Image: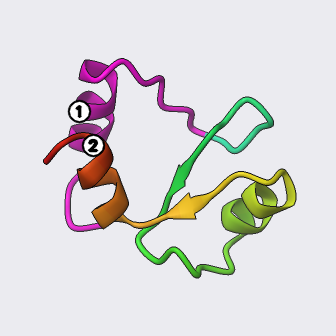
Amino acid sequence: MSRDRDDIEADLRAAGFIPHPAVTKAVRLLVAADPDSLSGKAKKARGYGIPVVGEGYLAKLLGN
């Protein structure tokens, strides 16, 4: 990621989102440096049907 995780999480909280440290069924979106990642978190998210997106999508979501 091009920005520090704490900064990204602060922006998410300011926009009314609740960041989660782990992927669970309660998570609605996973932001990854590489949306095509094969990491454990990305695999788990896809298994739950949770979209895995990149920083560009997050910036659009937050209106940046």
10 Å neighbourhood of mark 1: few (<14), some, or many (≥20)? some
Q: Is residue 3 magenta?
A: yes
Left or right: 2 in relation to 44:
left
Left or right: 18 in relation to 37:
left
Q: Dividing the picture into quarters, in which one does residue 20 lie? A: top right
Residue for point 28% across, 23% down: 15
Residue for point 57% across, 46% down: 29
What amino acid is found at the position of numbered circle 2 in the picture? Answer: Ile
- Residue 40: percent from left, percent from top: 74, 67
Residue for point 70% across, 44% down: 23
Residue at the extreme right of the image, as rendered: 47
- Residue 3: percent from left, percent from top: 20, 58
Exactly how many numbered labels are in the figure? Answer: 2
Q: Quadrant of the N terminus?
A: bottom left
Please give the residue where the numbered disc 1 appears in the rendered image: 11
In magenta, the rendered stretch is: 1-21
- Above or below: residue 17 compared with residue 62: above
**Do the numbered discs 1 and 2 sit on residues whose CB atoms are within 8 Å?**
yes
Please give the residue where the numbered disc 2 appears in the rendered image: 8
